[in-house]
Amino acid sequence: MSAPSTVLITGGAGFIGSHACAELLDHGYELIVVDDYSNSAPQVFARVQRVAGRFVGAVYELDIRDRQALSAVFDRHSVDAVVHFAGLKSADASTRRPVEYYDTNVGGTTALLRTMHAHGVHQLVFSSSCAVYGEAGLAPLDETAPTRPTSPYATSKWTCERILADVCRHRPEYSVVCLRYFNPVGAHPSGLLGEDPRGTPDNLMPYLAQVAAGRRERLRVFGDDYPTPDGTAVRDYTHVMDTVEAHRVALDRLADAPGLHVYNLGAGRGSSVLDVVRAFSRACGRPLPYEIAPRRPGDVPALVADASAVTRDWGWHPSRDLDDMCQDAWRFQRLNPYGYEGSARRPNTDRRANGGLPNR
Ligand code: NAD
Ligand code: WQD
């Protein structure tokens, strides 16, 4: 197998996907993106182009479960590898809409795998999640830690991993990397790309950014009675630029790595909610208001990665700290107070009525 040069990115308009597009373009990859914009907007591609100085080769608006539309993309382009970001990602929402989560995350992945198979494409990087570990202690988790998914979202990611393990077990031509992200946050240092959630942010960092921008009054800290040093929950926040660099390294290595590889992608450092509040306050130059609220159902006290395997095998390790994450998130928020939609007109995009063919 040769190293991939044309890469299809599913969900490339999303938070991590758009940063990955910039990173991969910057390193010479040719990119084809598919996204249904269910949680993103096509304006992001003009930003990606400004950051990378190059265009994404083609962008298709389609749902990855639509195998006919997806197949037309593979017919049209000679795809060497796929990075699969597309999916639904809220553990909380998945408890209210479990079937939708399985349909999109598991059904989307099997539709993609069938299409890849039909087109002889066997290299895949898959977005998995630390959510597969579920309830855990304060100690860093390596990839052998037990998986105990506690939400339909987490089970959907775990199920995809199982499917990919079976594919690799029975089809030696496949090379698959499952990256279990911990908490990717932050933004591109240019301030052009960042996290642009729809509606009220579920996640800590984008919520804090909106408090800092004056769009929300104060943060509600969900629980101060956890068995952690300051009583608030501990997570392993990882800069999104470090996260996407790992995808580039994975693509560089895939060709020589048959079989299934599962890696944690985390910084290996735990930060409490109050640590993040303090770091964001430093970034924006004023103390951010917060109040203690009850625990959020389904939250676990701590999730911290032992990410030494990916360092050992690939030499990847994160180089940015929590202050960098907050400074970059704040820069994006300051420059784009209402996100991408607030700053640009929706460009001309093809719809499925058009066969899902490209808008450039
Ligand atoms: P995101 O919602 O910003 O990006 C996902 C993209 O996929 C969006 O652009 C959305 O429009 C698209 N999409 C969703 N369903 C689709 C479908 N059926 N067909 C085509 N496109 C579709 O999310 P993100 O934060 O960039 O996450 C990317 C991936 O990483 C997801 O699979 C998520 O589960 C996983 N992940 C994210 C985190 C995190 O904290 N952000 C942590 C662990 C794992
Ligand atoms: C972080 C901490 C909250 C918001 C989520 C998904 C998980 C994975 C990573 C995709 C928690 C606290 C939050 C707020 C708060 N994603 N918090 N006030 O829950 O660790 O993980 O992203 O795979 O599946 O569930 O991230 O950013 O929501 O929360 O106090 O308004 O901040 O309780 O302790 P989480 P988060």
Image: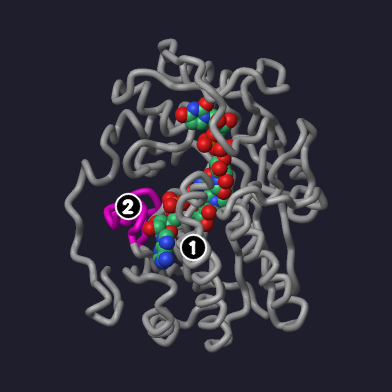
Q: Is residue 226 shown above or below 335?
A: above
**What is the secondary structure assignment of the residue under circle 1?**
helix
In this picture, residue 63 sits left or right of residue 324: left
Residue lying at 51% horizontally and 49% vertically, measured from the top left? 95
Kindly indicate the quadrant of the structure image that contains residue 319: top right
Q: Indicate the amino acid at tag 2.
A: Val
Residue lying at 36% horizontally and 53% vertically, measured from the top left? 39
Alpha carbons under labels 1 and 2: distance apart:
29 Å
- Which of pointers 1 and 2 lies earlier in the amino acid sequence? 2
Q: Is residue 58 shown above or below 132?
A: below
Q: Which residue is mark 2?
A: 44
Asked if residue 251 shows in the view, the reply is yes
Residue interval drawn in magenta: 37-55
Kindly indicate the quadrant of the structure image that contains residue 334: top left
Across and down, in percent, residue 90 comes to: 49, 47
- Is 46 colored magenta in this rendering? yes
Across and down, in percent, residue 296 comes to: 54, 31
In this picture, residue 324 sits left or right of residue 235: left
Q: Is residue 63 shown above or below 53?
A: below
Kindly indicate the quadrant of the structure image that contains residue 313: bottom right
Q: Which residue is mark 1?
A: 99
Instruction: Look at the image and tell me in which quarter the C terminus lies.
Output: bottom left
